[in-house]
């Protein structure tokens, strides 16, 4: 992941802001894809307690946490 300073985000570099936007869009695309996969798996298994559903849910959680951390870094 990129390391961004607060001055860079406030207008020090337009390129840095564009990089941040690309990373945000990429993470959101991955999260949405994982959500779709999880929804389809839940429909197929018809059981939220299934180990495969749990693993897919954990996989989604990892990307959500990455996105949240990235958002916090961007605000610093």
Image (spheres, rainbow, N blue to C red):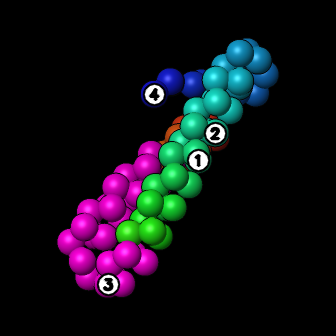
- Spatial separation of the CA atoms under disc 1 and disc 2: 5 Å
Q: Quadrant of residue 17?
A: top right
Q: Give the SS element for disc 4.
A: loop
x then y, percent, for residue 1: 45, 28
- Spatial separation of the CA atoms under disc 2 and disc 3: 31 Å
Q: Give the SS element for disc 1.
A: helix
The residue tagged 1 is 28
Q: Residue at x 68, y 32 (%)?
A: 21
Q: Give the SS element for disc 2.
A: helix
> Would you say residue 69 sits in the magenta stretch?
no
- N-terminal of the two: label 2 or label 3? 2
The residue tagged 2 is 25
Residue stretch in magenta: 42-67
Above or below: residue 44 compared with residue 68 = below
Above or below: residue 58 compared with residue 3 = below
Q: How many other residues sit within 10 Å of disc 1, few (<14), some (14-19) or many (≥20)? A: some
- Is residue 20 among what the camera can see? yes
Please name whichever residue, 18 or 75, is drawn nearer the observer in this view of the structure: 18
- N-terminal of the two: label 2 or label 4? 4
Res. 47 mark: 3
Q: Residue at x 36, y 84 (%)?
A: 46
The residue tagged 4 is 1
Q: Residue at x 59, y 24 (%)?
A: 5
In this image, 29 relative to 55: left or right?
A: right
Q: How many other residues sit within 10 Å of disc 3, few (<14), some (14-19) or many (≥20)? A: few
x then y, percent, for residue 49: 26, 82
């Amino acid at each position: 992941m990129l390391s961004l300073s607060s001055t860079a985000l406030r207008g020090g570099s337009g390129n840095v802001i564009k990089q941040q936007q690309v990373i945000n869009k990429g993470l959101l695309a991955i999260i949405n894809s994982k959500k779709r996969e999880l929804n389809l798996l839940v429909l197929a298994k018809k059981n939220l307690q299934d180990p495969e559903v749990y693993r897919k849910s954990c996989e989604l959680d990892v990307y959500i946490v990455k996105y949240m951390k990235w958002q916090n870094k961007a605000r610093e």
